[in-house]
Image: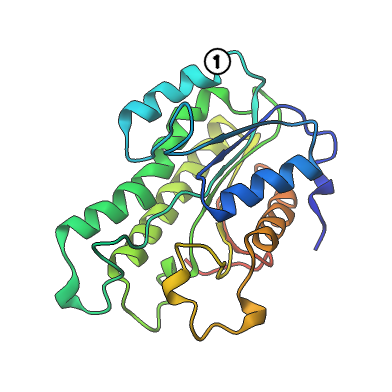
Amino acid sequence: MTTASGWEGLKGTALVVGQGGIGRALVQKLGERQPQLELLWLGRRSTPSLDLSSDADLNQLGEVLTGRSPLRLVINTAGWLHDSQRGPEKRLARVERTGLEQAFSINAFGPILLARAVESSLGHGQSAWFSSLSARVGSIGDNRLGGWYGYRASKAAQNQLLRTLAVEWRRRLPSVCVTLLHPGTTATPLSAPFQQGVAPERLFSPERSAGHLLDVLAQQKPPEDSGRFLAWDGSTIPW
């Protein structure tokens, strides 16, 4: 696998969405590898805030980007799996409308609405990358264990929405590459309750995950690679 040196000379703005462990590590890695990029890191607790479930936040994003150099890289790391009130549904009896709506609002609707919000700032004729974290459990073809209804379905919905976006942008914005990325099991609060039983060599630090993700993204070339669903090691995941 090549490294992010494939982006040598990449100039413009990089937007990282989500202030969890992987988002923080991506900002750090980008600062080290691509110091010429103007970094913008937004999330629910940033100023200005960017909550992907908030139309107001998404609508003001265009104003935030006005006057900045063109967006060359967007990586969305925001996602929802569980909170203090509910976790992944292991069986049908646990499936509730509120949990499904929460999962879909952030995991499925958020990324496509983010794409709409940044579209006019992307690339400006130069190559650009729009990516969002998905998950292997969002693969319909790879679903052998069941469970996690809302998370699986919302990630699968995100995959379909961004795959459809890639088809459209190949026509209208052929210089933009859309990529869905599975980071592997990463030691963050999102996965903390589910890390038991994961082999140590398969549980990545946020820094390691961020490095893998940038390595994979740097290899994708628009428009021919747009619309792919890839694992942290660059392998293709079935839809």
The image position of residue 163, as x and y in percent, is 48, 50
The image position of residue 160, as x and y in percent, is 41, 54
Residue at 65 percent of width and 68 percent of height: 235
Instruction: Give the residue furthest to the top.
Output: 67
SS at badge 1: loop
The image position of residue 125, as x and y in percent, is 68, 24
Colouring convention used in this rendered image of the protein? rainbow
Name the residue nearer the viewer: 22 or 12.
Answer: 22
Q: For mark 1, what is the residue?
A: 66
> Can you tell which quarter of the image residue 96 is in?
bottom left
Name the residue nearer the viewer: 160 or 133.
Answer: 133
On the question of residue 112 being in view, the answer is: yes
Name the residue nearer the viewer: 226 or 149.
Answer: 149
Left or right position of 10 against 80: right
> Can you tell which quarter of the image residue 180 is in?
bottom right
Left or right position of 135 against 41: left
Indicate whether 144 appears above or below 34: below
Left or right position of 8 against 156: right
Q: Give neighbour class at mark 1: few <14, some 14-19, many 20+ (Cα, 10 Å).
A: few
Q: Quadrant of the N terminus?
A: bottom right
On the question of residue 142 being in view, the answer is: no
Residue at 51 percent of width and 51 percent of height: 20
Residue at 38 percent of width and 43 percent of height: 110
Report how many numbered discs are placed on residues in the image: 1
What amino acid type is highlighted by mark number 1? Thr
Indicate whether 184 appears above or below 23: below
The image position of residue 170, as x and y in percent, is 57, 39
Residue at 74 percent of width and 31 percent of height: 37
